Each structure stands twice: as structure tokens, then as C-alpha cells.
Image: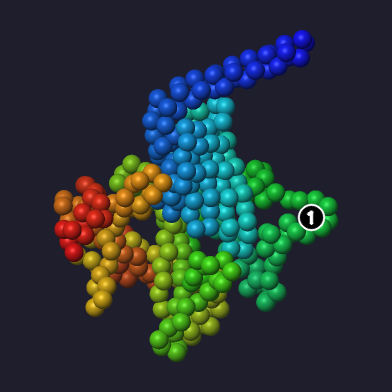
Amino acid sequence: MWWIIVISIVIFIFYRFTKDHREHVETHITQFGGMKGKYELLITALEINGFKIQRMTKEIVELSSFSSHCTLAYVGTNLEVCLSENVPILGHTKKKWIFPDGYPQEKMIEEMRNHAIWQLNEISKYYDTIQNQGDTPLPTQDEKNQENINQGHTEDVDEEKDILANIPTEDKIQNKVIIIPFDDSDPQNIINFGESSQPDFIRIRVESKELVSNEGSLLTFQTRRHRFTIAKEVLEKYKLGIGSDFCKYFPECRISVREQVGEPFWKLEDRVQSPKMTSANEEEGTPAMVHLHEGLPIYRQTFFNVNAGSPNYDDVFVQTTEMITEEEFNAIYK
């Protein structure tokens, strides 16, 4: 008989816990429009930086980009943000933030921005050290972790004290335009440089993070990537390779983003530039949407600028006044 009483007590406690949790979620999440509504600012910042929503429940939002995965989970009375990334040089990293309910989302974005800046600085310091010490490469973080495992202990790169110790102060933050692999879509076959039709030239891809304001309502870092052709002589003269920072030799260089209305930036015989659009979400049944300004499509293009004298040096953004589906766009403009 006593075991029946014990089971009854356990069932009652479990029922009360789940009931209280449901009521708490209803009060703190559902009434605010669910996770997407309550944390709209944070989710928008992640989407601007290349993340797409993969799964969403009452308490969890999962987003991913090509090399990163981010989970927003409402646990207890806190929002837990878990970021897992595969970063060049640093290897596979994990970082977790715990924000109390009501914590300003602007500050959440700021803390994640600081983490991204720290990563870029670590990558830059790695290559600076190689250039100063010669051709002997330093171990990646994965290699250092394996070395620690062999010695019987591990070092968590997400240790809060380590992150805080390495966050750069405002006077140390500088623009960076980093050379990244030309094509890393296949992790098993990463292509560092692309081929050019001209034998003395080569194709490269660069990446930068720019502080932008999204139509005046959101201040965040925007990841920009651009491919272009460069003379092999330039790479050899400045000893540029994967991870090198163009700003070390050209302090004013930057990747700019320019938008214009009505006409695409380029047209080829068999292809016309696509307009600015959001990605389709098959899981939610949301189609791809084209950005319009007063009824005309918006086109976006990136440019690599060596110095401030470049004609496309400054960003130009166009306000989105409405959006239509890709099918509607094709029916009207194609």
C-alpha cells in the first residue's frame, strides 16, 4: 500500500510542476506573442546576421546559419542563449548566455556582439603571430583542447572569465576585412581561392562586420561577404592568405552595401540580378518575400573599397515600404 501512496505523491508533484510551468509560460511568453514576439529584436538581429529559424515551440527557438547554430530557450524565469559555431582557427566553439526575464534585448545583442568582436581579434592575433614568428603555425583551439585532453584536463573556451578578459575596450575596436575561404560549402572540400580566367589573377572572398542601424530601430553588427578578383602579385607582396586582414595594409578599406530602386546593378545575357528578398521558411509555410519601395523592387549589391576615395565607399540603404511574394514579383516584373 505504501508504494501506491509514494507514486500518488510523485504524480501530484509532477502535475503541479507542469501546471505551474504552463501557467508561467502562458503569462511570460504566450501573452507576448510567443517566443518570436517576445524576443523579436534579438531574433531579428540574428536573422540579419545570416541565421534562419529552423524550429519553434512555445519555449524554444532554434536558428542556424551555414556554420553556426543558436538556441533560444525559456527555462524557469530565464532566457538561455546557446551559440555553437565552427570558426576558422578557433575551431568548434560553444558559448552560453543566461538572461533574466525582462533583460533588455539591446544588451543581449551587445554581449553577443562583444563575443563576435573577441573572436575576430583572436583570429587576427593568430595570423599576426604567424607573420612575426615565421611559417610555423600555431595550434588551433581544437588542437589545444585535444592536447589538454591527452594531459587529463580540458579547457572550455567559453569560460566566462576568459571571454570577459578578452573583450576589447572601445579604443581597441577597429575595422577588419578578413580573407576567408572562397568556397566552404563542403566542409570536406574547402576551396581557399577561386580560379580566374586571367592567369596572373585569382578570386578571393572577404568578410567584415559592420555596425548598422536597421531602419533606425535596431543597432547591430551585420556580417558582409564579398568575392572579387585580385592580382597574385598583390597577395605575394603583402603576404596575404586565409585569415589576413586587409585593413592592416589599407586602413580605410571596407565592404560597403548599396541599395537602389527599380533597376538591378548588373545584367548579363542569360541572367539578371535578383532583387532583395527574405528566405522562404518551408516549415512555417512562409514564402520568399521581395522588398519593395513605393511599388518598385529594391536591389542590393556589395562592393570592396580600398580607400575612402572609392565611388561606392559609403553605404546606401533604401527603406522597405511593402513586400510581395516571389511569385507575385515574377508575375509582374518577369
Q: Quadrant of residue 307?
A: bottom left
Mark yes or no: residue 258 visible.
no
Q: Is residue 232 left or right of residue 94?
A: left
Q: In the displayed image of the protein, which residue is found farthest to the right?
A: 151
Q: Position of residue 207 (x, y in %)?
A: 46, 64
Residue sitting nearer the eye, 159 or 43: 43
**Is 172 above or below relative to 199?**
above
Give the tally of numbered discs.
Answer: 1
On screen, residue 180 versus residue 153, left or right, reads left
Q: Is residue 9 above or below residue 210?
A: above
Q: How crowded is mark 1: few (under 14 residues within 10 Å), some or many (20 or more)?
A: few
| Most distant residue in the front direction | 1
Foreground residue among 4 and 132 = 4
Please name the residue shown 22% across and 47% down the image: 322
Can residue 295 be seen?
Answer: yes
Decide: is 147 above or below 95: below
| The N terminus - image quarter | top right
Residue 51 x/y as whole percent = 45, 51
Q: Which quarter of the image is occupied by the C terminus?
A: bottom left
Indicate the amino acid at tag 1. Ile
**Pick the front one: 232 or 281:** 281
Q: Position of residue 224 (x, y in %)?
A: 42, 60
Q: Is mark 1 on a helix, strand or loop?
A: helix
According to the picture, the residue beneath numbered tag 1 turns out to be 149
* Residue 124 versus residue 112 in the image, above or below: below
Q: Residue at x 24, y 73 (%)?
A: 267
Residue for point 57% across, 22% down: 18
Residue with the most extreme bottom position: 199
Percent position of residue 209, x then y: 45, 57
Q: In this view, does 308 lie to the left or right of 295?
A: right
